[in-house]
């Protein structure tokens, strides 16, 4: 029993840091409506800055000053980010804002790598709080007791700031109704910069406080942003008390899982301690399904209008058709050039697979209007499906290539059923949660999936087991896949999908079951992503949980947005550009992420309609204007 | 027996009774106007009839079958079409595709994955557009239309599955007087030729008095009067609700345009 109580105390200590990060994220979302992907990066910066300062300023006062300094510095960086970047994109579609903040993640990660290096950095213990106290016969770190206190203290301070100051009143007003605020003539941009700085400061503080507990490392950004998202969504977007309660709930559930350890139910043994990676996402999934706007949140109004209305679909003109044929023909002769460009075939297979993956995501994101942040789940299910069908069930490649997409489709049947019940940011978060769940299953189920090592030795059947043959196999399957996806967009089903996205009310009033259409779309996208995954695993010969990670999902998003979400060719252009960039940049510098981030930022600011969209607009502009000639 | 029978219908939003127990009938071949000041509960009534809102109490029967509890798409299948106060169309489809979409749905072809939607029921759709005078704009994006035109497209969409009952929430808002008359004349013709039942709301009293067969007046969620144009015009309660003292029924058109 005493171990249980101590574990609960542990949970409370963990909740504090979690709360600080999430509170900042929630605050920023409430006022700017931007889901700040870079919030975890600010947290990470907090840890690193605190590390450097506390190493430089020895002594008790130096340490505590370092924490405060770190929080302030991160707050300043946050303000800078808001003024230089985000301010320019408040009017842009939601997705572009996400993309921009994700680019920041890349830039900050490489900035940290450049300044502090890749080694984990172990910080000092907090002076005066190094020891432990005895609680119920067990040793409990004094510093953790301090953390337990700090959470509620910060909550109280933020609460006072929001309710007792004029600034706080304005922030709360802005959270409720931006338009009203501007009507009151409040100088909005300073208010927003202030909120951003405060949110960043909280993240920085959360990070700095973590220094004595865990070494600073480069993976902290993604891990903490995942946790923070979950807390914010569970608590309700924009609600600070919600973030506090959600942080408590999640930290405690994790603590209980650790305490439970391995439990036997009859013949089954469940390892609860391994569940800690998934459990928060399970909580989030349940909350989103039961109370879609979170425990303390309020139902959101209709999702914000995102950009200009999409143009109607037109069948491909003659020139586009010929271009496509020429492109495929050009690719088909690539093997002849193997002598000169030995790497071309390998890269082309990667490009083709990426194109299919991106097109499948675009299918639900563009025409379907569902912004999935966990599309890697289906890619990974296909990849693992193929690998396991071969390894565990002993099927040949041909059968695995057919069945793996079915496996991914079945995954999409389950995840999709829940996801289509939500929309907007909430749908994005739920799909992210499912993606994480799939990832952690692959990561932890050592016996079946090979755990973090993954599976190796998954080679194609004899006839396809050489570069040229596998290239042709991929080319044929991807071209067929892309054609099928496109064809479906022109079918009644594809139209119904767009109709449901444009107006749920109208669709429902003419007999369209929008949720069911979306569900089917989800499954179709899952099947094609699964096919891409299966092709991927045979092209590499091995697989690891990487293919299911958030990063992979975000890669897909970047590809789609890069190409332009409103154009059918967009995902293909985007996938090719992105994969090629990643490939060339990664080989020429250690800091490819920063470069990629910089490129993404540039594109977001310069081509908000995506590359293919930009080309399309250009062509329309150059052509004699038909509409005007009427 | 009349086509639509509404009995004791009510809806409250967190204690506020938006519609407070109303009864009325609409017969096949009847053009019935539901009038009342802003916030009277007209749109709420419409939303309950087509299933978009679930009634808090009472019953809505179409041909004797209960509609309360059914989903909008189920009610649509039973032959109830509607237009919205703020027009709802599919912005990324062309005008004709909007109507085709409704035809595809009524033919049960929504889950067809391989055929081409562009050619599906195009002629029928063009015919419907012709009826509302929008055929010339068939291939323009719906998002490029003037608001009055969008409302006409909406009517064509609503007619696509040959409904028995049509619900029109302020069908002529945003239109010039000539357009209003054309649209209402068309509606009247449909009522007569197809024996269609139409329930519509309208702020322009000219339109109401010129075209409605009968009218009912809603104020603060309750029906306060019913009858012919003449009866309504002289009804003291109606005059009180509308104008306090009651002098004229003319409502400034400009004001409605703004509201639309
Ligand atoms: N979803 C809702 N939640 C809360 N209250 C609502 C809701 N919909 C309508 N109301 C309220 O119900 C009352 C009736 O609204 P309704 O839209 O039915 O009026 P109306 O007669 O159509 O008015 P108008 O002529 O302005 O269109 C109003 O007081 C309105 O504020
Ligand atoms: Mg209304």
Image (spheres, helix red, strand yellow):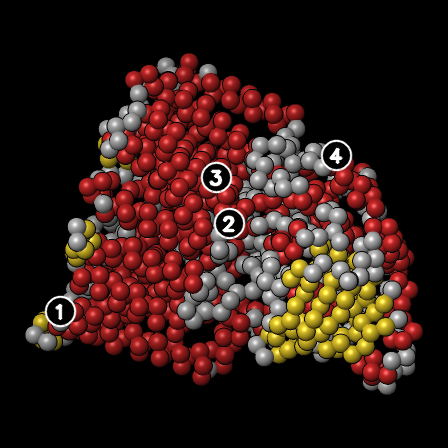
User: Which element carries disc 2, helix, strand or loop?
Assistant: loop
Looking at marks 3 and 4 on the same chain, the residue that comes earlier in the sequence is marked by: 3
Image depth: mark 4 or mark 1 in front: 1
Residue where numbered disc 1 is placed = A3
Disc 3/disc 2 C-alpha distance (Å): 13 Å
Label 3 sits on a secondary structure element that is helix
Name the residue nearer the viewer: A145 or B183: B183
Residue at x 46% of width, y 23% of height: A476
Q: Which residue is mark 2?
A: A370
Give the alpha-carbon distance from disc 4 to disc 1, as whole Å: 77 Å
Marks 3 & 1 on one chain: yes
Quickly name the residue at label 4: A624
Q: SS at mark 1?
A: helix
Residue B186 in view in this figure: no
Quarter in which the C terminus of chain A is drawn: top right
Both labels 2 and 1 in a single chain: yes
Label 3 environment density (alpha carbons within 10 Å; few <14, some 14–19, many ≥20): many
Front tag of 3 and 2: 3
Residue at 49% over, 26% down = A479
Q: Is residue A196 above or below residue A429?
A: below
């Amino acid at each position: 029993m005493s171990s249980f109580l101590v574990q609960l105390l542990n949970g409370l200590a963990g909740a504090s840091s979690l709360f600080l990060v999430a509170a900042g994220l929630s605050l920023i979302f409430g006022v700017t409506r931007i889901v700040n992907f870079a919030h975890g990066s600010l947290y990470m910066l907090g840890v690193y800055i605190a590390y450097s300062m506390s190493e430089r300023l020895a002594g008790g006062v130096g340490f505590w000053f370092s924490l405060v300094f770190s929080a302030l510095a991160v707050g300043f960086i946050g303000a800078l980010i808001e003024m230089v970047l985000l301010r320019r994109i408040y009017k842009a579609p939601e997705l572009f804002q996400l993309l921009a903040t994700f680019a920041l993640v890349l830039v900050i990660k490489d900035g940290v790598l450049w300044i502090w290096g890749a080694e984990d950095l172990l910080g000092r213990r907090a002076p005066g709080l190094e020891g432990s106290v005895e609680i119920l016969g067990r040793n409990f770190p004094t510093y953790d007791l301090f953390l337990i206190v700090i959470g509620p203290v910060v909550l109280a301070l933020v609460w006072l700031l929001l309710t007792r100051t004029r600034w706080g009143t304005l922030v709360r007003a802005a959270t409720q109704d931006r338009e009203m605020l501007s009507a009151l003539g409040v100088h909005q941009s300073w208010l927003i910069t202030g909120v951003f700085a405060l949110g960043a400061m909280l993240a920085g503080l959360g990070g700095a406080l973590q220094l004595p507990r865990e070494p600073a490392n480069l993976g902290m950004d993604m891990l903490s942003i995942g946790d923070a998202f979950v807390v914010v969504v569970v608590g309700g977007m924009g609600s600070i008390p919600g973030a506090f309660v959600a942080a408590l709930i999640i930290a405690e559930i994790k603590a209980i899982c650790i305490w439970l350890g391995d439990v036997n139910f009859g013949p089954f043994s469940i390892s609860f301690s391994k569940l800690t990676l998934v459990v928060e996402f399970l909580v989030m999934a349940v909350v989103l399904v039961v109370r879609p706007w979170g425990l303390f949140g309020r139902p959101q109004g209709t999702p914000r209008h995102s950009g200009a209305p999409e143009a109607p679909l037109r069948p491909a003109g003659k020139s586009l058709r010929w271009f496509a044929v020429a492109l495929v023909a050009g690719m088909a002769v690539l093997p002849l050039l193997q002598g000169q460009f030995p790497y071309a075939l390998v890269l082309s297979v990667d490009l083709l697979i990426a194109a299919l993956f991106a097109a499948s995501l675009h299918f639900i994101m563009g025409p379907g209007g569902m912004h999935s942040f966990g599309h890697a789940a289906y890619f990974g299910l296909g990849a693992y499906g193929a690998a396991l069908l071969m390894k565990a069930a002993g099927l040949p490649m041909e059968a695995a290539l057919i069945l793996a997409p079915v496996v991914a489709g079945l995954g999409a049947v389950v995840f999709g059923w829940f996801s289509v019940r939500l929309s907007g940011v909430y749908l994005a978060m739920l799909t992210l949660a499912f993606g994480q769940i799939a990832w952690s299953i692959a990561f932890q189920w050592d016996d079946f999936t090979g755990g973090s090592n993954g599976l190796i030795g998954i080679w194609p059947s004899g006839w396809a087991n050489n570069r040229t043959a596998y290239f042709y196999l991929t080319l044929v399957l991807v071209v067929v896949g892309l054609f099928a996806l496109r064809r479906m967009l022109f079918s009644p089903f594809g139209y119904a999908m767009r109709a449901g996205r444009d107006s749920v009310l109208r669709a429902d009033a003419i007999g369209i079951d929008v949720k069911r259409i979306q569900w089917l779309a989800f499954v179709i996208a899952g099947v094609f992503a699964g096919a891409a995954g299966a092709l991927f695993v045979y092209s590499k010969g091995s697989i690891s949980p990487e293919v299911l990670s958030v990063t992979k999902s975000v890669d897909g998003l970047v590809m789609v947005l890069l190409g332009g979400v409103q154009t059918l060719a967009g995902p293909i252009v985007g996938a090719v550009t992105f994969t090629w960039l990643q490939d060339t940049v990664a080989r020429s510098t250690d800091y490819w992420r920063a470069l990629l981030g910089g490129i993404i930022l540039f594109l977001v600011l310069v081509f908000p309609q995506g590359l293919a969209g930009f080309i399309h607009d250009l062509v329309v502009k150059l052509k004699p204007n038909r509409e005007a000639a009427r | 027996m009349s086509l639509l029978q509404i009995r004791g219908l009510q809806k409250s939003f967190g204690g506020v009774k938006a519609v407070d127990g109303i009864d009325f009938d609409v017969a096949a071949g009847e053009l019935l106007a539901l009038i009342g000041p802003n916030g009277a509960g007209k749109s709420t009534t419409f939303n309950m009839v087509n299933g978009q809102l679930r009634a808090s109490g009472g019953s809505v029967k179409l041909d004797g079958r209960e509609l309360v509890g059914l989903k909008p798409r189920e009610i649509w299948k039973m032959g109830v079409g509607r237009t919205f106060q703020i027009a709802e169309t599919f912005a990324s489809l062309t005008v004709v595709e909007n109507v085709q979409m409704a035809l595809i749905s009524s033919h049960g072809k929504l889950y067809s994955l391989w055929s081409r939607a562009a050619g599906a029921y195009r002629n029928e759709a063009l015919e419907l557009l012709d009826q509302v005078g929008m055929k010339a704009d068939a291939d323009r994006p719906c998002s490029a239309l003037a608001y009055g035109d969008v409302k006409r497209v909406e009517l064509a969409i609503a007619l696509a599955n040959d409904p028995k009952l049509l619900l029109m929430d302020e069908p002529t808002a945003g239109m010039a007087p000539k357009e209003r008359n054309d649209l209402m004349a068309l509606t009247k013709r449909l009522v007569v030729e197809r024996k269609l039942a139409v329930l519509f709301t309208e702020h322009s009293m000219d339109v109401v008095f010129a075209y409605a067969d009968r009218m009912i007046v809603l104020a603060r969620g309750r029906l306060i009067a019913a009858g012919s144009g003449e009866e309504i015009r002289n009804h003291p309660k109606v005059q009180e609700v509308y104008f306090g003292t009651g002098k004229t029924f003319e409502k400034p058109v400009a004001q409605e345009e703004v509201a639309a």
